[in-house]
Image: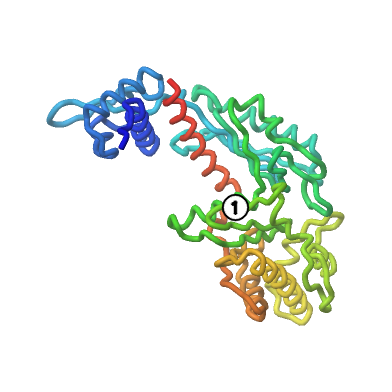
């Protein structure tokens, strides 16, 4: 059996030291040895190499009390950051994230409706510039991660306009717009996919490996997670369920988006769902709102039946502005139980900016990996 080379052992040691200092703001060599399980002399050698490479630093803090005084090490202040962006109907949000997971700065700019590519491009440039200017001295922006409330072509990263889409009207490339602000790659994906990733990250590792995440808000979307991975499809627009044929009012076959049009649950002049009107219908208990609830429940049950037949999920999770409403959950459950094949339905647990949360988590993981790769390269 071939023994690992000395260079490989050093590289692994450096990675363990760096990742320990990513989890903690500062540690002594003794604490690093205890957390990594690596001997103190080996940790000391690693600290010397990483300090010489400019990746870690002596923070200037010292241990107190009895015994030998120890120095605290931390990551270099200019080790690099990540840019996290959300493009949503209510506006563009940009965050600058450090390798500890702390948000160094955050900026938001509202968007008019319907959002046009030129307007979104201008907002993207503005918030990215503002957020990076607000967090100087932290080194290069090593990568960017973008969540977009629109379909995303997986090859190009461009936002794709589909018929009846309620948000962005036209195509846009966030990676091209942000290229001058980011030194490394810019990853772009649909917001519902990021919501599903955030939901999976909220449970213990190994759980929730196969599920469907149905986003019910102003827009309609779905993410399918199989074997722990979001399945994006050939072009990247898998899960666009708005045009899936289901059961509409009166038992007629209708596209899902048309069901809400027939029920008068769209915002005037747009294909976006009127969330306030829909919630009023589900909160009501009179003869007028009862058939509306039944029609929505039946239509969504038809969508879930298709998802179960094709994807075989363990559970279906309902998220979005109205997906987790108790009356919506109860109505859909009651209708879905009548299907030949049904699975449990539950509301999403991550409800505070779930798409941004999912994108932020990916950005942090990729940033830490980039820093480790930098250590291997020096």
**Residue 281 visible in image:** no
Position of 216 with respect to 162 (left or right) is: left
Position of 243 with respect to 145 (left or right) is: right
**Residue 239 visible in image:** yes
Q: Quadrant of residue 363?
A: top right
For the point 79% across and 60% down, which residue is it? 243
The residue lying toward the viewer, choosing from 186 and 261, is 186
Position in image of residue 281 (x %, y %): 73, 71
Instruction: Name the residue carrying label 1.
Output: 230
- Residue that protrudes farthest toward the left in the picture: 66
Q: Quadrant of residue 359?
A: top right
The residue lying toward the viewer, choosing from 158 and 323, is 158
Q: Quadrant of the N terminus?
A: top left
- Residue that protrudes farthest toward the top in the picture: 52
Position of 16 with respect to 342 (left or right) is: left
Q: Quadrant of residue 331?
A: bottom right
Q: Quadrant of the C terminus?
A: top left
Position in image of residue 269 (x %, y %): 87, 55
Position in image of residue 266 (x %, y %): 81, 61
For the point 79% across and 78% down, which residue is it? 288
Number of numbered discs on residues: 1
């Amino acid at each position: 059996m071939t023994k690992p080379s000395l260079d490989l052992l050093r590289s692994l040691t450096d990675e363990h030291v760096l990742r320990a200092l990513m989890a903690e703001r500062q540690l002594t060599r003794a604490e690093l040895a205890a957390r990594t399980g690596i001997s103190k002399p080996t940790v000391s050698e690693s600290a010397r190499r990483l300090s010489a490479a400019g990746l870690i630093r002596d923070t200037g803090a010292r241990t107190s009390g009895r015994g030998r005084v120890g120095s605290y090490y931390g990551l270099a202040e200019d080790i690099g950051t990540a840019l996290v962006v959300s493009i949503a109907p209510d506006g563009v949000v940009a965050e600058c994230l450090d390798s500890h997971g702390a948000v160094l700065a955050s900026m938001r700019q509202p968007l008019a409706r319907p959002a046009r590519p030129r307007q979104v491009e201008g907002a993207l440039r503005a918030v990215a510039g503002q957020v990076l200017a607000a967090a100087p001295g932290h080194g290069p922006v090593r990568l960017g991660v973008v969540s977009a409330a629109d379909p995303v072509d997986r090859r190009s990263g461009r936002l794709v306009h589909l018929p009846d889409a309620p948000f962005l009207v036209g195509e846009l490339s966030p990676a091209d717009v942000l290229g001058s602000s980011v030194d490394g790659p810019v990853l772009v994906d649909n917001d519902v996919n990021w919501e599903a990733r955030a939901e999976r990250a909220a449970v213990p590792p190994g759980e929730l490996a196969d599920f469907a995440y149905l986003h019910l808000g102003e827009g309609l979307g779905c993410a399918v997670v199989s074997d722990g991975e979001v399945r994006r499809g050939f072009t990247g627009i898998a899960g666009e369920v708005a045009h899936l044929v289901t059961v509409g009012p009166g038992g007629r076959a209708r596209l899902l988006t048309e069901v809400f049009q027939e029920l008068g649950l769209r915002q005037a002049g747009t294909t976006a769902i009127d969330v306030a009107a829909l919630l009023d219908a589900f909160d009501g208990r009179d003869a007028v709102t009862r058939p509306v609830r039944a029609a929505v429940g039946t239509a969504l049950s038809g969508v879930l039946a298709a998802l179960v037949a094709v994807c075989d999920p363990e559970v279906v999770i309902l998220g979005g502005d109205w997906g987790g409403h108790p009356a919506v959950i109860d109505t859909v459950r009651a209708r879905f139980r009548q299907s030949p094949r049904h699975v449990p339905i539950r509301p999403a647990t991550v409800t505070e900016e779930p798409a941004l949360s999912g994108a932020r988590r990916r950005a942090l993981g990729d940033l830490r990996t980039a820093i480790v790769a930098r250590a291997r390269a020096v």
